[in-house]
Image (cartoon, grey):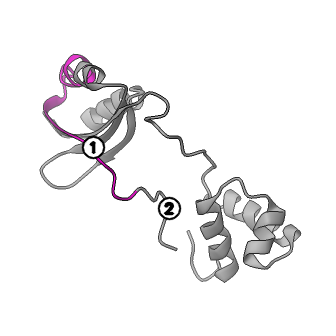
Amino acid sequence: MIDSTHNGFDRAILSALQRDGALTNAQLSEIVNLSPSQCSRRRAALERAGVIRGYAARLDGRALGFGIRAFARVNLRSHGAASDKDFASFIAAQPEVRAAHSVSGDADYVLELHVRDLDALADFIHDRLLPHPQVIQVRSEIVLKSAKEDGGLPL
């Protein structure tokens, strides 16, 4: 967690790494005005503290054949620790589900799905999601266009 122990340099490092996680410590040092060794120490400390959870490339789903991005709002039949754990385990094993969130409101979960085409979306919803014993209702929306996709935090 960033608090009073994390100063402006830590925030600058985190901000730069959100934009480009492949920055070397030398490149990072030029951006945040610290020596490469200081950047390296601060970066390692942020990683050990769990503030930086990892690094990943942002891929273009359409370029890789995943033409459909959708959100599915799922209502469960019952609620409780065992049923939630069972559904979470099921979702974790589904490669189409790229993110899953337990939410407040009229749905129990919101799932972000990436699939190759409409047939694949229909197959996932009808053949795997709806037959799950905990699922009572699924409402889905297909993303037509993304207005903003900034995966970072507003530091």
**Could you tell which of marks 2 and 1 lies nearer the N-terminus?**
1
Occupied quadrant, residue 14: bottom right
Looking at the picture, which amino acid does disc 1 mark?
A: Val
Residue 17 rendering spot, x and y as whole percentages: 65, 62
Residue behind mark 2: 152
Which residue: 31% across, 30% down?
86
Was residue 146 drawn as part of the magenta stretch in this picture? yes
Q: How many marks?
A: 2
In the image shown, does 68 or 136 lie closer to the viewer? 68
Label 2 or label 1, whichever lies nearer to me, is 1
Was residue 136 drawn as part of the magenta stretch in this picture? yes
Q: Which residues are magenta?
A: 124-148
Q: Does the rendering let one see residue 7?
A: no
Looking at the picture, which amino acid does disc 2 mark?
A: Gly
Which residue: 49% across, 40% down?
60
Q: Does the rendering let one see residue 4?
A: yes
Residue 77 rendering spot, x and y as whole percentages: 13, 33
Which residue: 20% across, 55% down?
104
